[in-house]
Amino acid sequence: MTLDYIKNPFDHAAKLRLTCVMLFSMAIAGGLLTRAGYLQLFSNPRLESMARKQFQSRALIRPRRGAILDRHGEPLAVNVETNSLAANPGKIRNKRVIARLLAKSTHLPYAKLLHRLGEKKEFVWIKRHLSEAELRGFKKWRVVDSDGDFVDGLWLVKESERVYPHGRLASHILGDVNVDSEGLEGIELYKNDQLRGRVASVTAIKDAYGRPTFIDADAVQNVHDGEPVTLTLDASLQFEVEQELENAIRRTGARAGTVIVMDAARGEILAMANEPSFNPNTKGIDPENRRNRAVTDGYEPGSTLKAVLAAAVLGHGGKLTDQVWGERGSFLVQGHRISEAEAKEKFEWVSLKKMIQVSSNVAAAKFAMRLGSDSYLNVIHSFGFGEKTGVNFPGEIAGKIPPRTEWSPLALANIGFGQGILVTPIQMTRSYAAVLNGGWLVHPTLIKEADPQPHLEKPVRIFSQRVSNGVLEALETVTQEGGTGLKAALPGYRVAGKTGTAQMVDPSTRKYSKDKYVASFIGFPLGVDSKIVIFTSLAEPRGAYYAAETAAPFFKEVLNSVVHRCGLPIRPSPIKILADQVERDRVRLSQASAVMASDVKLKKPEATLGQRQDGWIMPSLKGFAPREVFQILQGYPFQLEMVGSGVVSSQVPEEGKVVAEGSTIKLTLVDP
């Protein structure tokens, strides 16, 4: 037997095993191919959902927020493009190292960053709205490489950031937004729906790191940018007013202050400023600095409320010449003593007009008591006190008027001179606007409407033109010799207004403080085309606290800014003449000119006024015609009142008397 015929007993078994392995592998491959073909050719909801979760997401596309503009189109709030840092925690290796580097770059706490990088999410914000310094820090600390690429799992997202190009300017009115550009305060909150536009949720395709790459272009068309909002503010005037407020705070040492400049006819607010202030570009500001005190804070108005009392008395048939006994400085009501602001003020008979001029508390209390609680309360409510003005500013308060059941004789007397009620600066501004515009209670507004809106409430007339004229006549004496607001007068303009010095309530004792006051002056220029009312107040001035020494000169500086910015021309003459009297005199003089030329030898306007330190020496005006009187007195700071027609027959003051600035010269005319 040879070896060629000897067979290995293991060959058959090896071939069998190999055949089985081949058949098994072919079966697996066939199964995989079949499964793959099935997956490719037939849908599977579960797998489709898994794929969508891995590669697709929903993204919110935020529109560009609308700009806020002043009345002339000056941007006060705009948007800029900025970068924010996002992460996919699941794609980041060595989270502790990355968190430490990010902490050094962004100055965020390490523990906070490590927590974010440990979240079981595919998207987290690391920091929104990065600064240039932070972007440079990423390179410094090797969070990005030399090509500018971030480590795996981190990327930049382009966003829109709200900025305020003028910093502090009008900050209390504008308010600000959060990191998602949603309004938090001020106009940003009040007009948030209009400013923010419409957000769209769209489908986005993510890359391997979870970053959105491709976005549904059709869905993006549903995004609508926000609409702009135009304010009634004048940015240039606002700037000047804020400067004057800062100067007044610095000069008087006051804790806070407020200014409002408003169109008395339309209710449009041209400027509104508060101190303390803030820069809305800076986050984390003390809430004390963010309050718009003009609408959110209440105070006792003090003597500025006496203008409302005067309107009430005149509206109930009273006259400026009506008098009350001044008690030589003080009197008792229900066992409590009501006194003048200063002990030296020992007034006897005080008219309604003088009550305004010298700001007599005793006279105000007596006029209020003569008027009665029911009548005075109705007038106060008609002025809108105790309710919101309709300015629709977030946080506006209504103030507080005591209910009728609490109007005891003492309460009535106190309210007569402005204590015992709570009002806001915007309410007081509106009340003086009604005095200036002929009795119409307007609705203050900060929004400049392109077209009048039919849903807006229209002004309501609360008293007559006669009442308005009477109150204006009284208020004008405040800035003239003998008035409490002499330092509010602006040379070349007729100025009317009222001082107010009100004690503040000490929150710890709930009694009137002996050393904390609110000094205010509210007024306006007269004899100009634009009807503009100005409110000024200073809280807790140090040293001299009376409004005559603090708020009045402050008002004068604001008025000076207003007349220059608004182009209010200086009056050609300081002489006050009734228009109908002038026209009547002109007609009658022209008719009598021939007679006067032949029968009367008129004096030539040669009379002059000698000047002294305390005023001017009055010349004789007897025999002069009105036009010649105008020539003589042209440019002098006097008020002129004429009665009758023809030529001057008598005058007050008489020839040789000293006439002080702001005095009234009264002339009686007769036909020649």
Image (spheres, grey):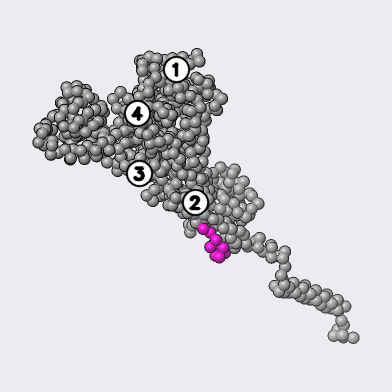
Residue at x-position 35% and y-position 28%:
474
Going by the numbered disc 2, the residue's amino acid type is Leu
Query: What residue is shown with label 3?
Result: 236
Query: What residue is shown with label 4?
Result: 474
Q: Which residues are magenta?
A: 216-224
Q: Which quadrant: the N terminus?
A: bottom right
Residue 456 locus on image (x, y percent): 48, 46
Residue 220 belongs to the span the image colors magenta: yes
Alpha-carbon distance for marks 2 and 1?
A: 53 Å
Alpha-carbon distance for marks 4 and 1?
A: 23 Å
Residue 449 locus on image (x, y percent): 44, 50
Q: Is residue 646 left or right of residue 435?
A: left
Of the two numbered discs 3 and 1 on the same chain, state the one appearing first in sequence.
3
Mark 3: which secondary structure?
A: helix
Residue at x-position 40% and y-position 36%:
464
Q: Is residue 508 above or below residue 94?
A: above
